[in-house]
Image (spheres, rainbow, N blue to C red):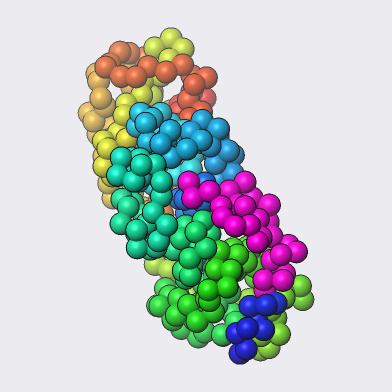
Amino acid sequence: MTTPALRAALLAWYDANARDLPWRAGPGAARADPYRVWLSEVMLQQTTVPHATPYFLSFTRRWPTVSDLAAEADGEVMAAWAGLGYYARARNLLACARAVAAEHGGVFPDTEAGLRALPGVGAYTAAAVAAIAFDREANVVDGNVERVMARLFAVEAPLPDAKPELKRLAADLVTADRPGDWAQALMDLGATICRPKAPLCERCPVSGFCAAFARGDAESFPRRTKKADRPRRFGVAYLLTRDDEVALVRRPPKGLLGGMLGLPTSEWRGRPWTDDEAVEAAPVSARWHDAGEIKHVFTHFSLTLRVFRAEGAMAAEWTRRDGLAALPSVFLKAARKGLG
């Protein structure tokens, strides 16, 4: 494979076809805002561009600089994050923002190593910010780039075992020439042309360099190891109402949905809850009745929540029914089920 020719073809395509995204400076721009690049990369982990974009616009309107975000109360940021999922990211977001504000004068470090030293910043995010915001020669490898590499080189090893090889292959294509644009060009190619299903090989600017295309089976790459069945857990969500209000509690800061407001729940365990067990585990004594169940899928397990409802009182953050939209989706689903 001729690396200069491949790079030239992909960068020319990117110059003409780059996605217009609110956190980008555009092809050939001197530098993007590190805060906006970092924020977008954190939001885009496990989230699509269409879903993340309104959150990004809302955050940057409300907190236009990293110092503004750092000064905000935890609860306000967690509430604004609700709906993006993977709530540990929101806690890491605040920890990183506060470190940049307190230890770096509100200015992001401009090297991959300096970024990696910030709390909550992993290898991928550090590489992405270094390349895109500071035009550093960094190897930025996300799921899109892994797919492109697996097809370009027809890598037979299945994911996730193939990750080190795919990262090495991607690194061989990185040079000091336009590293930020190169990283974004690969991302855009994977997102719009080299798609997981039905790749648009006839429109691909680098199909002439692609081993999988030459074989005629691009869609079969990357190879994947069969996933194990997702474990199932069971719990009870308690919908305690008082006139037009619902009782919410803040979850512990650590763990799944940490720091978020939600309905009180039982523990989540490996077997279903009986009616008697559900009532016994309730946060307060009341006339609880079964209001149905909901199912929700997390990354590592699926959850079935029985919803029990009652009228009553308890120490809680009482919220009007029309103010529940900011709840994490699992609790919003449970509340809607319980409210009918």
Q: Can you say whether 293 is above or below 47 in the image? A: above
Question: x, y (%) of residue 220?
Answer: 59, 78
- Picture residue at 62% right of the left edge, 89% below the top: 2
- Tag count in the figure? 0
Q: Can you say whether 195 is above or below 238 in the image? A: below
Residue extending furthest toward the left: 280
Q: Which residues are magenta?
A: 10-35
| Residue 87: in magenta span | no
Question: x, y (%) of residue 339?
Answer: 48, 23
Residue extending furthest toward the top: 243
Any part of residue 217 in sight: no
Q: Main secondary structure of the magenta part?
A: loop
Q: Nearer the viewer, residue 123 or 256?
A: 123
Q: Can you say whether 264 is above or below 29 in the image? A: above
| Residue 20: in magenta span | yes
Please tell me in which quadrant of the rendered image residue 259 appears: top left
- Picture residue at 27% right of the left edge, 37% below the top: 253
Image quarter of the N terminus: bottom right
- Picture residue at 40% right of the left edge, 61% below the top: 111
Q: Is residue 273 left or right of residue 112?
A: left
Please tell me in which quadrant of the rendered image residue 229 appears: bottom left
- Picture residue at 50% right of the left edge, 82% below the top: 172
Q: Nearer the viewer, residue 245 or 129?
A: 129
Any part of residue 117 in sight: yes
Question: x, y (%) of residue 49?
Answer: 59, 51
Question: x, y (%) of residue 139?
Answer: 47, 71
